Every structure is written in C-alpha cells, then in structure tokens.
Amino acid sequence: MTAVRVENVYKVFGRKPAEAVKRLKAGKTRDDVANLGTAAVIDASFEVAKGEIFVVMGLSGSGKSTLIRMLNGLWDPTSGHVYLGDDDLTAVDGAKLRKIRRERVSMVFQHFALLPHRSVIDNAAYPLEIQGVEREERRRRAQESLDMVGLSDWADSLPSQLSGGMRQRVGLARALAADTDILLMDEAFSALDPLIRREMQEQLLELQDKLGKTIIFITHDLNEAMHLGDRIAVMRDGQIVQIGSAEEILSDPANDYVAKFVADVDRTRVLTAASMMQAPQIKVTLGAGPRVAARELREAALPKSYVVDRKRVLRGVITSDNAVRAVKEGAETVAEYLEADYTSVHQDTPLAELFAPATESALPMAVTDDEGRLVGVIPRVTLLEAMAPSEAVEELTADADTVAPGDAVDTDTSTEGASA
Amino acid sequence: MIAAASDTGTFVPRLPFGDWIESFIDWLTATFDAFFDVVKTIFEGIYDGLDYVLNSPPFILVAVVLALIAFWAKGTKLAIGVLIGFIIIAGMDQWENAMDSLALVLLSAAVALLIGIPLGIWAARNDHVSRVLRPILDFMQTMPAFVYLIPTVVIFLTGPMPGIVATVIFALAPGVRFTELGIRQVDSEVVEAGRAFGSTDGRILRQIQIPLAMPTIMAGVNQVIMLSLSMVVISGMVGAGGLGNDVVAALQRVDVALGFEAGLSVVILAIFLDRVTSGLADRSPVAKALKAAR
C-alpha cells in the first residue's frame, strides 16, 4: 500500500516561479532558468510504500531538504501533487493541513529543534499537547516514548544538559509520541559524531522492526543511506537521478554521477550474503543412497559436499571418505554419515560480518534463508573480490596461479565450486 | 511664521515643510480636541495614581520595597546598593522629584512597550510591515528629542502629558526593533517543528517564538526604560515635573549645586532601573535554561 505519493513535483524559489516551471517542463535546465528563480526540486516523482524506509540522498543544495518539507506542507510545491494516503496536500486548506500534521506525519530535525526552556518530557509531549491530549495522559505517553529511545531517566532534565546524541533521541521520542504513521527525518543524524550516528541508526532500525512506520529519511551520507534504506532516491541539482535498493544502486548505477558517488561507499556494509552467493555446484540430497553421493563427489572431483533434505533444508556435510565408508557398510542413505563441520550464514548478513565466519570455514560458507534452506554458497575468493575494486582483483587473479577466475576453485579449502 | 525667510539664498526655493507640519498639528488639535482631552484625563489619572503610591508612604518604606524588587531581580548586592542610593537621594532632598520621575518613566515605558512589542511582532511576521516601519523608527530615533516637546505642548498644553507623549515617541523604537530582531532570530527549525506538529501560528508565537525571543525582547525593554528616563528629564523643559524640573531650573539659574544633586539622583535612578530590568532578562525561562547548560 502506498503511504506517500509524489507526482511531478517542482519547487522554485524566486521571482517568477511559475514561469520557471513552465520552462523547465519545456526542457530547459536549472541554469537556464536561474534568472527567474532557484529551482530546488525539478520533476520529482516517487511512491513510498507503507512500512518502508525510503531514503533521499544527495549533497547539500540537491533539493532534498526542500523535497521533504513538501511532504508535510511546510513548503507548497510550485507545481505537482503530494499525496499522503488519499489526501492531496496541495489542495487542502490550512486547518485540514494542521490536522494531517497532527495525526499522520511527524518530523525529526537535523539540529533537534527542541524547546530549550522545556524539560525533556515536556518536549516529547509537545505534539500531544497540540493534539489536545490532556496532561496526565500526554506525560504518560511521552514517558513511554522516552523509554523506547532509552531516555527514561532524563525526563526532567533540560535539553541543554544532554549530549547531542541524547538530544536527538528526544527529537525522535517527540516524533514517536505523536504516534503518526509517517515519520520524516531531515538529516536527523548528520549533526552527530560518527560513532553516535551509527548507534542511532541501529536504534532506528530496531524501533522500526517493532513499530513498522513509514520513514522518509534525508541524508547526504551514502553509507547511512545504504544502511537504512529499503529504497534510495539519489538527488542531484534538484532532480532524482535514480531510485532503487542499495544493491541496485551499487551494482547498476544509473549514470556516471551515481557511479562516482558510490565509488567510495563501504561496500561491506551494503552488500549482503545473498548478493554475493553462488549456486552450489553440487548438493547431495539426504534421501540419496551412498553410491549416488560417492559418484557425484567423484565426478565433481570434490572431497566434500553439503547435504540437503527434500525441502532443501541444510542438514550437514558428507565427505568422500564417509560416502565410501557408507557404501562399504551397505547403508541405505548417507544420513548416518554426515559431519557438522561447516559454517552457515543467513542470506541477509552484511558482507562486513562474513569475514570472521569465512576464516573458520573449510567449505565455502553455506547461505541459508529463513527456513534454513540452502540457497547458495560463498567461496572465499568471492569475498575478497567484493572487497577490492574490480581491476585490482583482475591483477591479483592474473598473478596467482592457484586461483583461476571463472574456473574450478582451489580444492584445498573448497569442495563445492564456484563457477563464477 | 517662517514666511519672512522666503528666500534661501540658493537656487532652491524655500520649502515650507515647517508650515505644513504646523498646519497639520493645528488641524489635529482642532479636530481631535475632545479625544485628546479624554486621553489626557486618563493618562494623568494613571500618573497621579502611580505618583500617589510612590510618594505618599514614608520614603524609607518605598525605598525598602524598591530594594526588595532589586533583590528579587538580581540579588543582595544590588539591593544594598539601591537602598544606599535612595537614602542619598532623600538626603539631597530630591526624593519627591525622583518618585515623580519614576512614575513618569514607568507609565511612559509601559505605553511604549504596549505599542512597541505588538508592532515588533507584526514586523517580524510581515516583511512589508518591517520595510515600512524601519525608516519611520529611524526618523523617530534621530529627530532631536526635544523637538517632540513642541507639538505635544501645543496639543496637551500643561502638566505631565506632553512629557509622557514625547517620551513614548522617543522611547518606542528599541521596543519595536528588539522584538522584531528577537523573533526573527529564533531558530527557524524550532518554528518549523511547531508547524510540523500541527501547531497554529498563534500558538507558535506564544509557545515558541516569544519565549525564545524573550532575552532579546527584555534587552529592548531595558533600552525603552533607559530612553524613557533620559526623555523624562528633558521634558522638565515643559514642566513635566520630577527631577527634570530641577535640572532645567539649575541650568537657567546656573546653579551648580542643584544641578549636581538632581543629576546624581537621575544617575542613581538609572542604575536601579537598568540593573533591575537586565536582572529580569536573566530570569526568563530560556535564559535560565541556557545557563543550566554551563
């Protein structure tokens, strides 16, 4: 379901906004209309699904802050429509707009925007006060949202007594207290230290798991965008140049600008096991007899293989020695001869967290889904490749005799192949 | 009146600005005579009331109350200083005059603020208003202070009223300017937060803009009061009463002793008013909250 829909929105500040939009629509560029006004947002269209984290990413001056301010009517679009649910924000009157802001959409600000003369709990209760909730009730609900962000003990402090990260938690608690379905976050973590920022991102994701809000998050930090966003819109000079998941943007940038932008992103945080895994070269099914298993291993020239059951759930590892032993002992299946000497990771595990398990695993790491089914494997060389830029890997692989790209993988450590 | 000087001695013809203003004031006096009478009655009534409160009890009682106000606003040191200062004023036989002046200052400053703060708020929210007000305020502030006394005497004749009106006009500007500046300086993100959570403009003004602008507005209040005091002294020239009368009398008689005593009383009163109003500025919730950070 769509929570927010933006249709061909333009925002021009300056002397003749309408005329500027007319020319932009006729194909003129931002620079062409500079004498009529500043085109902050040009022809933006996107939809945000309910429960999604939608990140708008761009450098300063790209129009992202203007864009987010049109989603709750702080700015009116010069042209185009913004729908929250079924309501067209560009068509509602002032009273209705305030009602929408009170009940449906709240906001977290870059510099926190707290009231300095009010205690933390009164700040958190501010939206409820405007909603007309009576005092006892709003203090109770404000305390709840402070509990959620881990500020239970600071309710009676003043914002000025808190650190930056804590102040932004108050900002977040305030937005949560409003209990709206849509949460706008304008560079919410940009003013914080990197470590605190990281912590806040994790907290936001945790809260999102519980609350399932629709979040529109503005940032200039690509890593943050990739980490938080279910989908990301990249903005440049007022235009949205690409919308897609983190992986789509990384692996298939729409143009040179995006490609350059993502060049220095920390790929290990963005890429997940699923984006790197390959199909297992062979897998022995549990029901198969030991002879079949032994033959498959022999044909693939591999000493070991993963074994799955009929539902493809990963059950263990069969070595060629064990397979041969099972044949000798006349076993019906290989079930009794499995070893548990392997490492498996969930398909959503980020690349950064794959290195440690990879070093422990003799086999290529098994990748499983929610049901424990074997969906792929990750050979070590793939991990190394993902870390390094592609040219570097080519050099590396050209030099190294032991690793031939695109062919069978080094059999000391891996049995199941990566036919890349 | 100025018709005799019909030649300016240059190629520029004599511009009859003065005549225009004079006819305007004459017209004003004639047309709004009844209105001005009512205004005069009201203001003089308030002034008499204030003066009665300050001047009819024994001086030491009033001095102690004022010292207590100083204590509440700032602390012990100021309270003691104020008390000593007031005893010195009484010792120079200027107490009654000082209280007359104080009553004039309080009334004029209150009127100036009642006009100035709303104008400042309006100017802060409306660029057109701001653009129109700015040159008018500049004009009001730079016109030599006692020029205001002339038309007000024409309109209100005698008593404290001409002094009050001239003082209000003279002291109005900083009230407007500081209020506008204070509200415009409020962090735009905080105002946006108010709007983003669905607050009405009036509520944003009440709960966000005015409280956050309060330290600056209070600096304006301080300026208004100080300007009022200086103008109240000048309006001694038209017999507004208080310390100004003695200052003017001393000037006319070249009486050094009386001039010094009246002048010193003005200084003591000025210190009291300045320290108390700046003390009040520090007591606003926002100022206190910011201090708590350190």
Image: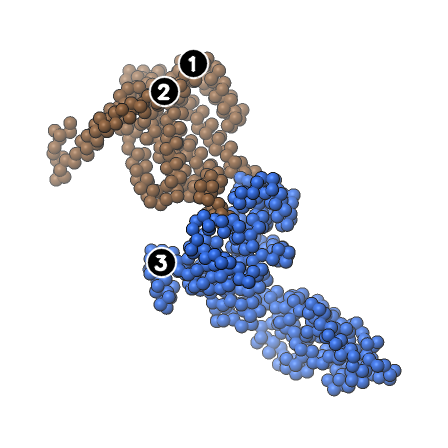
Chain colours: A blue, B brown
Q: Chain of mark 2?
A: B
Q: Amino acid at mark 2?
A: Gly
Q: Locate residue B174: give its quadrant.
A: top left
Q: Are marks 1 and 2 on the same chain?
A: yes
Q: A339 or B38, which lies in front?
A: B38
Q: Are marks 3 and 2 on the same chain?
A: no
Describe residue A60's horizontal placement relative to residue A374 as left or right.
left
Q: CA distance from mark 3 to mark 2?
A: 56 Å
Describe residue A36's horizontal placement relative to residue A171 as left or right.
left
Q: Residue at x 28, y 28 (%)?
A: B148
Residue, disc 2: B45
Q: CA distance from mark 1 to mark 2?
A: 16 Å
User: How many residues crowd mark 1 within 10 Å: few (<14), some (14–19), many (20+)?
Assistant: few
In this rendering, the answer to whether B48 lies above or below A353 is: above
Q: Chain of mark 3?
A: A
Q: Chain of mark 1?
A: B
Residue, disc 3: A17
Q: Amino acid at mark 1?
A: Ser
Quadrant occupied by the C terminus of chain B? top right
Q: Residue at x 82, y 80 (%)?
A: A333
Q: Which mark is residue B56?
A: 1
Q: Locate residue B94: give its quadrant.
A: top left
Q: CA distance from mark 3 to mark 1?
A: 67 Å
Residue B264 coordinates in the image, percent (x, y)? 39, 20
Number of numbered discs: 3
The reply to whether dot 1 and dot 2 touch (C-beta < 8 Å) is no
Quadrant occupied by the N terminus of chain B? top left
Residue A187 coordinates in the image, percent (x, y)? 52, 55
* Extreme residue toward the right, this view: A329
